[in-house]
Image: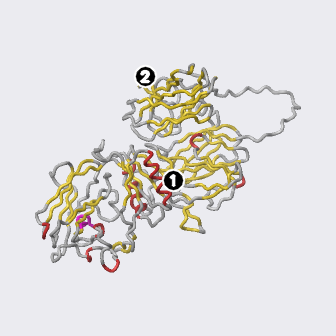
Amino acid sequence: MAECRDFYVTGAIPAGIVVPGDVRIELFRGTDIAGTPVRSLESHVDPVNGTTPISAIAADYPNGTSKGTVMVPDLVREPGGLGETWNKVVVTPQYYSGVILGGVTKSFDTNYTDREGRPLEDLVAGDYTIRVTGLSGGLANLMAEKRITLGKTHAALGRFSPTAQKDRLTAFAREHDYRIYFDSFPGYFYWNSDGYVIPGRWVSNDAIEVSNDCPGTLIDTTGVAENDLFLYDVRNYSATYTVETATIIRTGLADSPRTVYHYYAAGEPIYTYVAQENGTRVSFNSTLSVFAIGDRLALTRAELRPVNSLDPVVDLADTTPKRLDLSPNNGIAVASGEGCLLYGVVAPIPATVIPGPSGRDGIPTNRIAGVAWSLLDERGTTIAASTIPVALGRRTNPEKPTDIVYSTYEFGGRIGAGVKPGRYLLRLDARDETGAFINGTHEELPFDVGSAPTPTPTITAPPTTIAPVPTPMRQPYRPHPTPGRVEAEDYDTGASGIAWFDRTPGNQGGVYRANDVDIERGGSAYNVGWVKSSEWLEYTLTIGRSASYRASFRVASPWVGRQVRVLVDSVHRATVAVPRTGGFDTWQTVTVSVPLPKGTHRLRVQFVGDAQNLDWFEFRP
């Protein structure tokens, strides 16, 4: 099971017991029953029949009875009230069931304290022992124990409609070797201050918990788990969204330095536009993008439209011609007469929540309030800059308020309006409400603005000698004859966006080369490390003959789902699936087939996914 999550302890009443009686459920940290339990719950049955009375349940059951055989321990309100944790056990003639609060939803249903009012500890990953003791009736003196492990988690939360959205996510999970569990936790509809109403039909919240490495896995550092959190856009009636997603972030669980955020716009509607390239109508569906480890900002798409039609609001019935770039991190090319709308998503709230200026609005002052962007020319001079606001809420179509137009954590705005044709560097940084920079939000990418053809002017004045502006050219760092081996650190010389692209300033390893590509001592001598998704390196190869070559890549990564894309003269030729090798210095060689043409060609190695290392690659016939 996953750490810091609520779970049920349920057991069958032994055959032959007519009046069950009270039970106590205790949870101990470790593999032995020792010390004080971290959770202790007790039922409070009717002594006549030994079961929990309906009057003790704060719920509206059809016809005053339970729905089938289900009675919900979450909704026990007697004794102590609905807000207590220690009374959340029900006993029926067939079974007993109690809910153990793990920490994520601690501010939702209960006071998150024990019977004496002491705060409860979050159930972080590790080994635990459950003990169930019969206290009265036919269960008196009966006892059962079970050991469990709360492990590292990859959690996905949300309501899915249509089913295709769920299918897309589960396919993604299976592709990355995640174990999938469909949560049948009921959907709560808030009733009033006295309790909740169970829907007339027992409905699933359609949440998915994607778990990996749970059985037998212990946490590396107490309180720090590996979490993949899938943040969904769902409508207000989803308790899973309003409780789980918001509370996870506000309590800091989602802010572990080893957390990966996956943004999946399940609630964003499909919208239609006209493809500028051929005039056909295209439907754009929701997309999946990834916040890499330590990141809080990810770019999702660039919309390139005629300048006179720019509008930063998604139109559900959009008939405006446009081009859609779904890989803006690789660089954005704006044609003559076009404008650019850039969209992205942010991890919503840093771990430490600071109340807003009013003290009542619940919006922390250190939230991501805007994304500042600037365009720099080849000399490094800023020629345009602005800020795109980030709304941590949803925007809807005024004509259909239930349709979400903007995703909950999405931002979007115009980039580079009125900029002269040329090659620029687009730099983005997220800021809080005070204007302070927020770590994990720095992005840099090439931004090219095309020029319209103009008539050649007639020169009537004497010619003037103009000193040429040097252009950073790409040159081979060393010869790379093929067949042969290429060390990853021997990429071509040249500026960022020409011979290489790196998303972080400075060489974090501080060795071998003096630019922003991160190189460390390791592997065969040096290796490229500290990789962030969408970074790339280019190499000039001299290929002896045209053939399909066996390409071997020496790679390392402690994570699953990483890839290396191989492009030759900007044409995609192969994808290398990087396995989970066990660590950054645990190397494996992965081989793929790559067709290479004879002659001198430019080969690009592009990384998909953070946290992977590359030592060398080689081509053999």
Sort mark 2 into few (<14), some (14-19) or many (20+) by Cα contacts within 10 Å: few
- Assign a secondary structure to mark 2: loop
**Residue at point 48% right, 23% down?**
512
Q: Residue 476 falls in which quadrant of the image?
A: top right
User: Residue 380 location, x and y as percent?
Assistant: 61, 35
Task: Determine which residue is flagged by label 1.
Answer: 369
User: Residue 197 location, x and y as percent?
Assistant: 37, 73
| Image vertical order of residue 83 relative to residue 176, above or below | below
| Image vertical order of residue 296 relative to residue 550, above or below | below
Task: Determine which residue is flagged by label 2.
Answer: 524
- Assign a secondary structure to mark 1: loop
Between residue 111 and residue 197, name the one nearer to us. Answer: 197
Q: Which residues are magenta?
A: 84-89
- Residue 542 can be seen in this image: no
Residue type beneath disc 1: Ala
Tell me: 83 left or right of 14: right
**Does the magenta segment cover residue 85?**
yes
| Image vertical order of residue 619 relative to residue 388, above or below | above
Q: CA distance from mark 1 to mark 2?
A: 45 Å
Sort mark 1 into few (<14), some (14-19) or many (20+) by Cα contacts within 10 Å: many
Tell me: 523 left or right of 96: right
On residue 470, which mark appears? none
Q: Residue 217 falls in which quadrant of the image?
A: top left
| Image vertical order of residue 9 relative to residue 571, above or below | below
User: Residue 90 location, x and y as percent?
Assistant: 24, 68
User: Residue 99 location, x and y as percent?
Assistant: 27, 62
**Residue at point 50% right, 32% down?**
592
Viewer-side label of 1, 2 = 2
